[in-house]
Amino acid sequence: MAESIIELVGLTKRYGTFTAVDHLNLSVGKGEIFGLLGPNGAGKSTTILMILGLTEPDSGTVTVCGTDSVRFPVEVKKKVGYLPEDVGFYDKYSGLENLVYTGRLNGMTETEAIEKAEVLLDSVGLSEHIHKKAGNYSRGMRQRLGLADVLIKDPEVIILDEPIMGIDPAGIREFLEMIVRLSKEEDITVLFSSHQLYQAQQVCDRVGLFVGGKLLAEGDINSLSKKLAGNSPYLVEVGIAGNSKTGERQRKNHPAEILQKMDGVLTVEEKKGRYYVGCTRDISSGIARELVLSGFELTYLTKKEYGLEDIYYRYFEGEANDE
């Protein structure tokens, strides 16, 4: 992994008898987009508060950009930009005026703040609305303005807490594309906290699955899917009709026998006339070719790669069954 920018070791937070975060260990590398994923109440927001130095852990350590968040919270806040789910602005100020105000709070001159604000508003697609009152912005426009507001102090880390809630599908796509572009162009580390699994899968380099204050699993989608499926992240489902060419050949060459001999096939299961083939990679075209050459007529073939929702719910079910 690249240089560690966020480092959590044994992080624990309790509220009375309730454990919100339970011995969390997590490392996020420089320039990485990391998804902290889980349902509401999983402990994601509490973790973010500890990273920002806004609440103290009961045990464990939090280091951001080499700085201890507990001992030096103000220093951490200088390096981290935070975009909450519900962004607050001065509604009677324009988008430009809101950003200039933030820039001035961060030590910029009026001229510097205006120049930088105009550049940022253009980069987030609000150049045509810079003089519009923030109170008249749509939900998606407020999130864009929030992203510009986060970026005006040149943060090394951006924390996004449920940033796409309430945005229409087109707005979500554009917002996520902006996150990826800005992260790569500026080499900014992004912590993306969400329960929207599909959207997170589109942008995150790695994810951590968070349930009941515990990190159940972490990694990229491919590695997690391999753990889930026993190293067979692809599943190909095949339907075969009766062989009209030569029934004798079909009896001698059972489909399962043909499939099991193929390179990349790990498992073959037959259910109600269909075959479910677990593979290490996508070999659906090879499966079709081998079966046709063996004299079988395909009626159906589809492939499925385990996505983040499959992974998450499998881990979530496993945790529930252990309790």
Image (cartoon, rainbow, N blue to C red):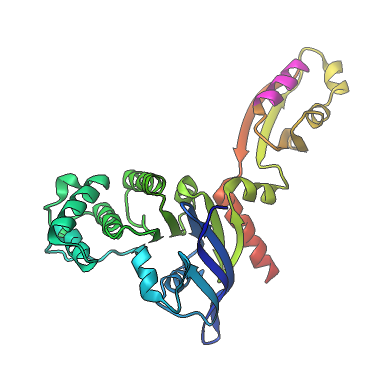
Q: Quadrant of residue 257?
A: top right
Who is closer to the viewer here, 70 or 318?
70
Who is closer to the viewer here, 321 or 271?
321
Residue at screen point 45% across, 55% down = 196
Which residue range is magenta in the image? 285-294
Residue at screen point 69% across, 51% down = 227
Who is closer to the viewer here, 275 or 283?
283
How many numbered marks have been drawn onto this rendered protein structure?
Answer: 0
12 in relation to 159, above or below = below
Residue 198 in picture, x, y percent from top left: 48, 49
Residue at screen point 24% across, 50% down = 120
**Left or right: 312 in relation to 235:** left
| Residue 268 visible in image | no
Residue at screen point 53% across, 82% down = 58
**Left or right: 62 in relation to 229:** left
* Residue 288 included in the magenta stretch of the image: yes
273 in relation to 158, above or below = above
187 in relation to 17, above or below = above
Residue 146 in picture, x, y percent from top left: 28, 58
Q: Of helix, strand and loop, which mostly describes the magenta segment?
A: helix
Quadrant placement of the C terminus: bottom right
Residue 238 in picture, x, y percent from top left: 68, 30
| Residue 170 visible in image | yes
**Left or right: 74 in relation to 64:** left
Q: Quadrant of residue 314?
A: bottom right
Q: Quadrant of residue 106?
A: bottom left
